[in-house]
Image (cartoon, rainbow, N blue to C red):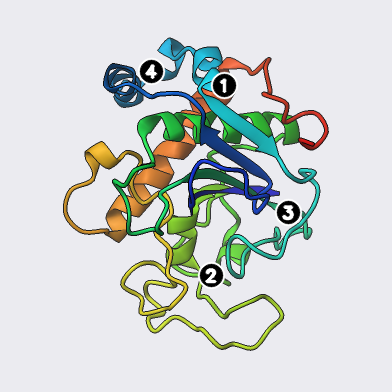
Amino acid sequence: MFQTNHWSGSGPVRLRAYHIENARNAELTPQYLKDLRGAWLNPNGAASVDFALLRSKFNVWKNDSLTTPTDYGTWDFNNDPNDGSPNIQIASMCLPGGATDFGGVEPFTVAHAWMHAYECAAVAQLKGLDVLASFPASISGAFQNGPIFLCSTHGERAIQTIDYGVPGGAASSQAASDEFGYFFGSGDPDSRADLFCLDAAWYVGNVTIAQAKTSAAQIRQHSHMIKAAGIHDFWGLDGPETP
C-alpha cells in the first residue's frame, strides 16, 4: 500500500473521486497562513500546529475503504506492484479551472499542505507504513526517475510514470517525452503538476521538476514528523466511509 496526494481542479465541494478529500469550509486569514507557513519552514514546526483548529477549517470526506483499489487518480500506478493493494488517493478540492490556476479564487495554500501531511501520517499510522520508505530497485526499475516513494504527490508520480491512458485500455496517450512522464512539459494531453508547489504564495517562475520533487519531499518529511509524534485523532479516517 502507498499514498499519492492531489489537488483537484474544482471548487471546495465533495467529488467522490478520491479515497480522501478535503476542502476549506472557513476563512484562511493571511495571518493564519503566515503562521502555518512559518511552522512549515521550521524543522520542528509540526509541534506548534494546532491540528484540531486546522481540522475545524476543513471538511474531510472518506469516500472509499482504505482497502479498496481504484482505477483512476494516478495513471499506471493505482495499485502496489508488490501485492495489488491500493494507492490511497488524497486530494484537496481547490484550483478551479484546472492545474494552471495556481493562484485562483480557491488556491492551494500551506493550510492545505498541512492537511495532506496530517492525513498521510494518519493513514500511515493506521496501515503501518513508513512515510519515508521507497520501493526496492526491482520494483522501481519498472518506472523512471526514481526512487519511487511510498508517499508522494501526483506531480512527482507524473515525472516517474508514463501515461498510457486508462489502465487496461489502449496505449493512446503515451507521453511525448519519456524523460518527463506526463508532468508539465511532457506534451502529454493528460499532463499533471499536482502539488508541484505547496503554497501559491511561494510560487514564482515556471513549473519545474525540481519544484515538484521538493514539494513531494516536504510532504513526506512533515508527515513523518506528525506520525513520529503519535496520532490519536484520525479525523474519522479510521471509521466508516462518510455518508
Residue behind mark 4:
45
Q: Please, what is the three-letter code of the amino acid marked with disc 3?
A: Pro
Q: Along the horizontal axis of the image, is 236 left or right of 240?
A: left
State the separation of the CA atoms marked 3 and 4: 30 Å
Which is closer to the viewer, label 2 or label 3? Answer: 3
Residue at 56% x, 88% y: name it: 172
Tell me, yes or no, if residue 66 can be seen here. yes
Of the image marks 4 and 1, the number of the one nearer the N terminus? 4
Q: Please, what is the three-letter code of the amino acid marked with disc 4?
A: Gly
Q: Which mark is residue 228?
A: 1
Which is closer to the viewer, label 1 or label 3? Answer: 3
- Residue 163, image x, y percentages: 52, 75
> How many circles with numbers are drawn on the protein?
4
State the separation of the CA atoms marked 2 and 1: 30 Å
Q: CB of mark 3 within 8 Å of CB of mark 4?
A: no
Of the image marks 2 and 1, the number of the one nearer the N terminus? 2
Residue behind mark 3:
86
User: Pointer 1: residues within 10 angstroms few (<14), some, or many (20+)?
Assistant: few
Query: Which of the pair 16/193 is nearer the observer?
Result: 16
Seen in the picture, residue 202 relative to 208 is either above or below; the reply is above
Residue at 45% x, 38% y: name it: 219
Q: Please, what is the three-letter code of the amino acid marked with disc 1?
A: Ala
Query: Which of the pair 114/16 is nearer the observer?
Result: 16
Q: Along the horizontal axis of the image, is 104 left or right of 54?
A: left
Q: Please, what is the three-letter code of the amino acid marked with disc 2?
A: Phe
Q: Along the horizontal axis of the image, is 212 left or right of 164?
A: left
Of the image marks 3 and 4, the number of the one nearer the N terminus? 4
Of the image marks 1 and 3, the number of the one nearer the N terminus? 3
State the separation of the CA atoms marked 4 and 1: 13 Å
Residue at 61% x, 37% y: name it: 130
Residue behind mark 2:
143
